[in-house]
Amino acid sequence: MKGEEVAPSNGNPARGGFHPIDGMRDWWADAPHWQRYGVYLALIVLALILPAPWVGSFMSPDSDWTTVLIFPVGTYILLAVGLNIVVGHAGMLDLGYVAFFAIGAYTWASIGTSYGWSFWPTVLLGIFLASVSGVILGAPTLRLRGDYLAIVTLGFGEIVRITANNTDSIGGARGITNVPHPEPIFGVEFFLDPAPYYYLMLFAIVLVIVFSVRLNKSRVGRAWAAIREDEDAAELMGVPTFKFKLLAFAIGAMIGGFAGTIYASKAVFIEPNNFPFILSATILAAVVLGGSGNLPGVIIGAFVIAWLPERFRFLSEYRILIFGFVLVLMMALRPEGILPSRQRKAELREGTGGMGAMGAEVAGPDSEASAEVTK
């Protein structure tokens, strides 16, 4: 039952000593509604005042802070929330997630420049095409698991980039220039001022977070958790694993395409080199660093991954060295991530955490992870 101590497993205590982050997470799990809504309200106020110059003078003294909040911070958070559905909820390792980001960006850039369509309906088209691409990739490959699936998705990401590089109708290696800005909406104009783009990105992030939370608490979320913990057992219990894995892939791709359309509308110019493999690896690092499967942790991880190189920009090339050192240090001190969920932390402790079991030992019915599931 919720709140009870978990029985020791394998001779080890189920819970170690008190840790501030773990204590905060446990408080949040038992917090009443009025406290939760108070935190939500505080976060919204914080997000609204975040572009203020006095905040930027500390957070990003060598760059325009509002622009940094759009890319990389906001874009990374939006992509990480989408990839978290594939990796954190469904337990599939995706190394080609940047492909869906590219499909969304190229959808708006090519249609906006060639046909003069409005931005707002084209966003829906970009989301749809990215989602269809996810289904096309997933249908023949999702019977693979672990490293094999990761290799296939990595190849898909490179195929999309190379195809864009060799297709003259979408600009080829020269890319697409003069990508139009979104049309004014509710009296807000999108042009050179980065502030409207920030609030557009913020709206997209909030929308995707609500969508992800609702999904995770639904029957779909429970099916994903069952697949992530033991796909064979889930299938034996009647869960249509292939259908739910394909759904996770399509939804993750959909969010990636959504991020791509917003990015292209702000960037004005895109080319294939804007969508390298390292971007997929960076977003995956954000998900793992923050705490795969736990939405607040993933958002914090994406923020840290995007913000640190900008904060230390004055160190020039050495900032990448410091960035890598900080990542290694954090993973050494918190291998389960900055803010993992209690269930995922228990899974990791028993060898079934990370991106699904991936051949690791499967948790038994008396395990700590199983006890967390029943809460």
Image (cartoon, helix red, strand yellow):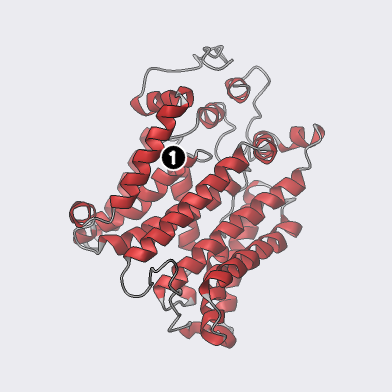
Q: Residue at x 62, y 47 (%)?
A: 92
Q: Place residue 158 in its image quadrant.
A: bottom right
* Depth check, front residue: 329 or 114: 114
- The residue pinned by badge 1 equals 297
Residue 371 shows in the view: yes
Question: Along the line of sight, which residue is nearer the eye, 112 or 6?
Answer: 112
x and y, in percent, of residue 178 in the image = 43, 84
Q: Residue at x 70, y 48 (%)?
A: 245
> In the shown orientation, is residue 179 left or right of residue 329?
right
Above/below status of 83 relative to 347: below
Figure label count: 1
- Residue 59, x across and y down, in percent: 23, 52
Residue 169 place in picture, x, y as percent: 59, 87
Query: In the picture shown, does residue 43 fall above or below 253?
Result: above
Q: Amino acid at mark 1?
A: Gly
Q: Is residue 357 left or right of residue 275?
A: right
- Front one among 120 and 239: 120
State the SS at label 1. Answer: helix
Q: Residue at (64%, 26%) from the top-left corner?
A: 363
Q: Where's residue 231, x and y in %?
A: 72, 38
Which quadrant holds residue 201? bottom left
Note whether 2 is above or below 48 in the view shown: above
Mark 1 Cα within 10 Å, few/some/many (few <14, many 20+)? many
In this rendering, the answer to whether 149 lies above or below 1 is: below
- Residue at the outermost front position: 187
Q: Quadrant of the N terminus?
A: top right
Q: What is the quadrant of the C terminus in the image?
A: top right
Left or right: residue 266 versus residue 147 is left
